[in-house]
Image (cartoon, rainbow, N blue to C red):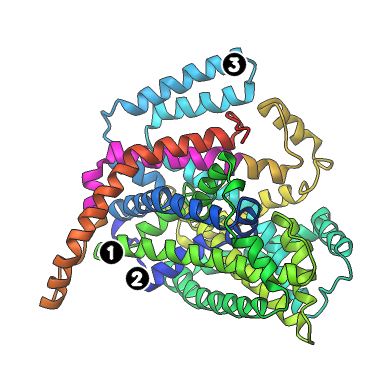
Amino acid sequence: MMEKREHWGSTFGFIMAGAGSAIGLGNIWKFPYITGINGGGAFVCVYLACIFFIGVPVLLSELALGRASQRGPIGAFGYFSRKSSILPKVIGGFGLGLSAALFAFGSNGLALMVGLIGIAFLVKGWSVAGFCCTAVAFLILCYYIIIGGWILRYAILAFAGKLSFATATDATGCFLGMAGDGWLSALLTIGFMVPCAGVCYFGVKKGIELASKIMMPVLLVIIFVLVIRSLTLPGASKGLEFFLKPDFTKLTTQGLLEALGHAFYSLSLGMATMITYGSYLPRQRNIFSAGLWIVLLDTCVALLAGIAIFPAVFAMGQSPAAGPGLIFNILPLTFNAIPGSLGWLWNGLFFLLMLIAALTSAISIFEPGVAALMEHAKFSRHKAVIVTAGSATVLGMVICSSVLTWERIPGVEALFQTLTGACRASLFEQIDYLCSSWVLPLNGFAIALFTGWIWGVSRASRELYRRGVPATTLERTEKIRSLFFMRLSVSFWSIFIRFIAPVLVLIMFLYAAGIVKFTK
Ligand code: PHE
């Protein structure tokens, strides 16, 4: 199994694939908006600090874990943990104790979940953390493909010139009609799943890497074109002001935690992707600089997305909205109304941008499931792709039936009600909430703890600055010059991964899960 593991053909290909995963809907529909309402430039500074101090250390850990073990998350955690290690038993025992306490307080669902994880830790040790990463990637995939399907439809409609609405109410009606129509959503979901599975079917080099090397440059070109168009609209400056003008009075503790959570989500951390992509890196590639490139591209695209969106929104007299509302209700109206006869083109380009961002991200959460089936069930890639695509589509169909309300599946709502006490508005929202607010931060916590304390910073850092044997004198001189910088950064990294990241990620979890609340 080990010697057959596929590898990226080039560092550039890996960076494009990694950036493809990181640059997703989060950059385009969430980051610009949360920046706007949380103090613009002031929030950007906080976000950059979160990316730099927490995002980068955890991303590097994930890449190093995958590369060093040459395994996906389940195998990677198992590979580096010692059988005799006492910590998983302590975590397992603690989980069971906590579960009993929760049960006594009447939180049955939570008690069940914590209890099961505790037992799993007792029996299987750290591999459970790898399993949780892979499972959450699969669950996110199941609802991400639905959004991908909607975007696919909007892209086609936009290029056909059929996405022109007179008012925001018309646009909202169109979106709600589509989201509420289970069959249409299901059909679109399949339409989006086919290219996503198709790319993974062709493997790492000929599938994911090739597709990313084509799609990511296209994405960058489109975003630059949209930025220029948007900035040259009369009245664009008001949008720029909303997005970037620093207002430190708007910064709150909630905003800080939102920045941290988003930094985490934006770099695709805790969802098995970066460990899996890291495991396809051959030994001689430098993880450190490749990881920094991914972070740089992700952050630049998030900022450029805001610069493309808000000036246009304000110039066209719209008001900004959050999340799905911004993309499906406000933006078609905005880009289509750009003066001249090319409204359809700007609209089409915007949805093509979204489609590429969604597709490369979906591919990256599709692959961990495939890798796990290949590694642990010894499936061939083709069989693993078919099984992953089939099961994600089936679960996606169930979620399609409950995008806006629980109406069509009251039984499932009752089940969640018993398990978790309170429910979100629909299955779609419920799964999103459980994944983003509970499982992702807990996975991040486990990754930081594991790298910092179990695998150990000295072994992990050796993996980080490992390079190929320098072939020429020039390379050797370069290596010595960069070694000092490298060592310094690695010692800095180890402090963050051992102490600061676990504490901050835990606080982020307590906040996101609603266990701790801040008034300001
Ligand atoms: N980084 C992605 C984003 O910003 C997060 C993500 C990746 C979500 C893959 C889903 C799938 O949207």
Task: Report the residue at 53% width, 69% height from top.
Answer: 199
Q: Is residue 432 left or right of residue 159?
A: left
Pointer 3 with pointer 2, Cβ within 8 A: no
Frontmost residue, 46 versus 461 = 46
Tell me which amino acid carries mark 1: Asn
The numbered dot on residue 11 is 2
Q: Is residue 153 visible?
A: no
- The location of residue 179, given as percent across then percent down, is 79, 56
Q: In this view of the protein, can residue 461 be seen by the observer? A: yes
Q: Is residue 254 magenta?
A: no
User: What mark, if any, has residue 223 been given in the picture?
Assistant: none
Amino acid at circle 2: Thr
Question: Label 3 is placed on what type of residue?
Answer: Phe
Magenta: main secondary structure:
helix
Magenta segment boundaries in residue numbering: 434-463
Residue extending furthest left?
A: 473
First along the sequence among labels 3 and 2: 2
Query: Are the two marked residues, 1 and 2, in contact with CB atoms closer than 8 angstroms?
Result: yes
10 Å crowding of disc 3: few (<14), some (14-19), many (20+) = some
Q: Residues within 10 Å of mark 2 (few under 14, many from 20)?
A: some
Quadrant assignment for ligand 1: bottom right
The residue drawn where x is 34% and y is 37% is 499
Q: Residue 201 in the image: state x and y as whole percent.
A: 51, 66
- In percent of width and height, residue 90 lies at 36, 22
Q: Is residue 90 above or below residue 153?
A: above
Residue bearing mark 1: 286
Determine whether the residue tagged by mark 1 lies in a helix, strand or loop: loop
Question: Is 392 left or right of 382, judged from the image as shown?
Answer: right
Give the SS element for disc 2: helix
